[in-house]
Image (tube, grey):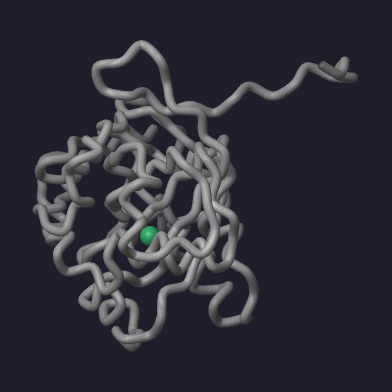
Amino acid sequence: MPQFVIAPPPQAVVPVTGRDAVFPVRRIYCVGRNYAAHARELGNDAREPPFFFQKPADAVVASGSTIAYPPATQDLHHEVELVLAIGVGGVDIAPGAARAHVFGVAVGIDLTRRDLQNAAKAARRPWECAKAFDASAPVGAIVEWPATARLPTSGRITLDVNGVRRQDGNIADMTWGCAEIITELSMLFRLEPGDLIFTGTPAGVGPISRGDTVVGEIEGVGSVTLRVN
Ligand code: MN
C-alpha cells in the first residue's frame, strides 16, 4: 500500500437490504431520455439511440438523508429512476448475458439543475454542472437480485413530493430495457463491479423547493426518500 500525502477520500457506498455489508460505488452512469413521454416533454424525438452521462461516485446520497438545496440553480428537478448495480464487470456484453453482470437493483433520483441544463443545451456545452453536482444522486438500498430472476421488465415507478404524485410511469415503457442498456454502455466503457447505472426517468419531472420531502418508489424494488433544506 502506498502512503498518501493527504488522507484518501472515503469510499462512496450504498446500503444493501438485509446485509451489514455495503455496496462500494465506482462510477455512476446515467441514461438520458429513456422514456418516450419524458423525451417528448423536454421536446425531443422519442426514438433516438441511448446516450449516457456520468455523475461522480461521491454524489451518492443515502435514502433518508436531508440535503442542502444546491447552489447556482433556481430550478432543481427530480427524476425518479430504476438503478442497476453492477457486480461483475465486462465489455461488449450481449443482451442475453447482461443478467449475470447485475448484483442488484435500487430506486434513485437523478437530481438535475434544469436551468443550467437548458443553458448548456442552448450553448452546446457539457452537462456536468447540470447533472454531476454534489449530492445529485440519492439512491435507496440495493435489493440483491436473485441469480435465477430476470432483470425487471415491468413495475410501476412513482415519485411524490410532499405526498403529491408528480411522476407515475412503468419501467415497461423504457425505450431501452435493462439488458440493452448494459449492452450499449459496455460497448463504450468497460463496466466494473461497483458501477451504478441510472436507467432514465418517466414523464412528470418538475421542481423541488426548500422544505420538500421527495419519495421515489418502484414496485417490486423499493424506495428512496429525500428531504431538501
Ligand atoms: Mn435522468
Front residue of 33/111: it is 33
Front residue of 6/181: it is 181
Q: Relative to residue 145, is residue 158 depicted above or below?
A: below
Q: Residue at x 19, y 52 (%)?
A: 152
Front residue of 182/200: it is 182
Name the spot of residue 131 as percent of width and height, x first.
Answer: 51, 56
Name the spot of residue 50 as percent of width and height, x first.
Answer: 41, 74
- The residue most toward the top is 20
Q: Quadrant of residue 161?
A: top left
Name the spot of residue 51 as percent of width and height, x first.
Answer: 47, 72
Q: Residue at x 47, y 57 (%)?
A: 113
Q: Relative to residue 69, is residue 129 depicted above or below?
A: below
Ligand 1, image quadrant it occupies = bottom left
Considering the image in quadrants, where does the C terminus appear?
Answer: top left
Q: Quadrant of residue 64?
A: top left
Q: Residue at x 54, y 28 (%)?
A: 12
Count of numbered badges drawn on the protein:
0
Q: Residue at x 15, y 52 (%)?
A: 157
Looking at the image, residue 125 sits to the left or right of residue 183; the answer is right
Looking at the image, residue 40 sits to the left or right of residue 171; the answer is right
Looking at the image, residue 57 sits to the left or right of residue 97; the answer is right
Name the spot of residue 4 as percent of width and height, x first.
Answer: 86, 19
Considering the image in quadrants, where does the N terminus appear?
Answer: top right
